[in-house]
Amino acid sequence: ANLEWFGLCWDGQQVQMLAETKGYLKRVSSFGTPPPGNLFSVIPDHTALLAWIGFEDTATFSQATDDEDAANFQTYILPWLGSGIACAVTEPRSPGLMDDELLFFQVADSAQAMRRLQDYGQKQGMIRHDMYQMFDVFEFVNPSLLAPVLQRKMAFKTPACTMLGDYVVFAPNRSALEVCIDKYIVNQTLASNVDFAQMWTKLPQDANNGLIVLNTHFFILLSQNFLNNISFSNNKSILEKIGDSGFNGAVLHMPEPGKLLIQAARHQSEQRV
């Protein structure tokens, strides 16, 4: 509904798509900023799906979240929010991905972030605030401060968060957050994953204003969550052929208003070929 036309080009390693936009996308002159290099140092290495969206200024992003559900987000997150937000789905083992989603908010002001999160807990309800390993952990009684970025209202019922590097990380619950912290401490992150690094070098580094990464090692598990039982059974043979093709990535860029460029690449581990 937001595209007039699109064309595809493949050079054997990289797929590019150029589209002319309309509707909502017509009004977006830029997706903002590429993901900072240190983003991948906090994303756990068992991530199945990752998306990043950057923005040049939070005022523009604030306008997109200006509704009745966004009051706590605008009060307790927007003042310290940096250049973008990432959403990750880790190894999808829980029913409906209820324990597998993580949100990463890039931080522009770490002191203010900790102060605002403390204030939110005091005013809206805090289960507890304590330490895990060497990190401050907040557990809240409701997810209202995340309302504008939550796709599913059932997720993150009692969110927990902490600051890892330059990011505030939200998890659906304390145990999911502790796994993320543990992996961060021992460097089990995408930044240390050789297969991810190989895929990343195949993508353009100067125009990645939006990013999507799929680790197809978890593709079947993801499909079981995203499709109903009948659809999964009917398409299982096709899904298995897609199978374990390694890391697949796509970057989004608007070279000019009304034009959307999507470039994709993949890398398959030699151990899985």
Image (cartoon, rainbow, N blue to C red):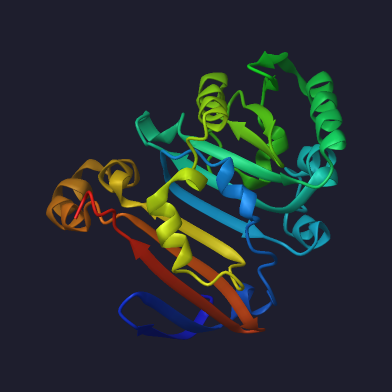
Report the front residue among 114 and 172. 114
Q: Which quarter of the picture shows residue 26? A: bottom right
Residue 230: image x %, image y %? Answer: 19, 45
Residue at x 53%, y 72% (from the top left corner): 204
Q: Is residue 51 left or right of residue 230?
A: right
Residue 128: image x %, image y %? Answer: 71, 13
Report the front residue among 273 and 243. 273
In the figure, 76 relative to 4: above or below?
A: above
Residue 209: image x %, image y %? Answer: 62, 67
Q: How many marks?
A: 0
Residue at x 68%, y 44% (from the top left corner): 105
Quadrant (top left/top right/bottom left/bottom right) for the C terminus: bottom left
Q: Which quarter of the picture shows residue 6? A: bottom left
Residue 193: image x %, image y %? Answer: 43, 46
Residue at x 79%, y 55% (from the top left corner): 62
Q: Is residue 240 left or right of residue 56?
A: left
Residue at x 21%, y 50% (from the top left corner): 272
